[in-house]
Amino acid sequence: MELGAGHGTFTDHLVAAGAEVEVTEMSGPSVRMLQHRFRHTTKVTVVHDRDGEAACSGGPLDAVVCISVLHHIPDYMHTVQRLIERIVPGGAFLSFQDPLWYPRRSKTSMRLDRTAYMLWRVGQGQLRRGLATRIRRLRGVYDETNEADMVEYHVVRNGVDEEALRELLDSSFEKVELHRYWSTQSSSLQSVGELVFPPTTFGLIANNRRPLSSSVGATCQTSD
């Protein structure tokens, strides 16, 4: 299952690798785009998950994939805990492209990240939008009707606690890898940042799900 598949960019890679994929998405327009994009294959099942609950229901899964999605979920720890329960023994959990937990990041890391973002905004001709979004963040305001806030809600919540997630996954998987890296929207700044800038983003790869009887903290029951 791919949680919050968006427009299916990563789904393409999963299908190309031979996987049968259940994709979930909260956005109605995105669901319609996914249905159209994968209309010619039986390997993709699109689920309109309006409230996030559908991701926890259904049968067992070999793997759960989350690409740039956990930071959109207010209680991501509880959601991941429930998703783990659907994964079969020996299965995997993969998550990438979420912002590192802000309280553990240095001031230099935060400044470089925000500067790179604003420079990208200028290049896109969206300086006014970027400044307005920044002002709302400083005020702690989250506007559900604003596309920029919907895309970058993690700023209000100080990023995603990668260490807490790793600890949660450690309780259910034999091997968990945490990868921290620099990531920004600008391709030129990405090339420079990979070489010299501190990490801003992280990914987690958890392999070999332990048998359910030996895991800790599971709350979601799979159906028969």
Image: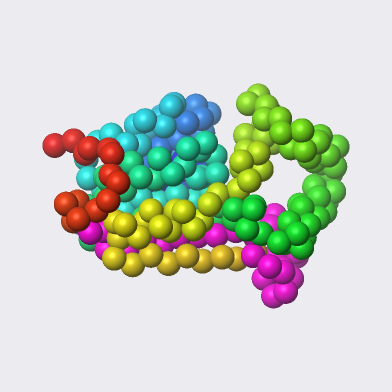
Residue 73 part of the magenta-drawn span: no
Residue at 45% x, 35% y: name it. Answer: 25
In this orientation, does residue 86 appear?
A: yes
Tell me where residue 55 appears, x and y as whole percent.
Answer: 35, 37
Q: In this rendering, is residue 160 above or below 31? A: below
Tell me where residue 73 appears, x and y as whole percent.
Answer: 50, 38
Residue at 33% x, 41% y: name it. Answer: 82
| Along the viewing direction, whichever of 8 and 83 lies nearer the viewer | 83
Q: In this rendering, is residue 168 above or below 55? A: below
Tell me where residue 28 appears, x and y as whole percent.
Answer: 49, 27
Structure colour scheme: rainbow
Residue at 56% x, 65% y: name it. Answer: 180
Residue 201 part of the magenta-drawn span: yes
Left or right: where 42 falls relative to 13: left
In this orientation, does residue 99 appear?
A: no
Q: Quadrant of the C terminus?
A: top left
Magenta stretch: give its range: 183-210
Left or right: where 102 falls relative to 82: right
| Number of numbered labels in the structure image | 0
Q: In this rendering, is residue 176 above or below 69? A: below
Q: In this rendering, is residue 80 above or below 140? A: below
| Along the viewing direction, whichever of 71 and 145 lies nearer the viewer | 71
Left or right: where 129 falls relative to 207: right
Which residue appears farthest toward the left when viewing the image?
A: 224
Tell me where residue 45 appears, x and y as whole percent.
Answer: 33, 39
Left or right: where 130 falls relative to 25: right
Displayed quadrant of residue 198: bottom right
Residue at 74% x, 37% y: name it. Answer: 137
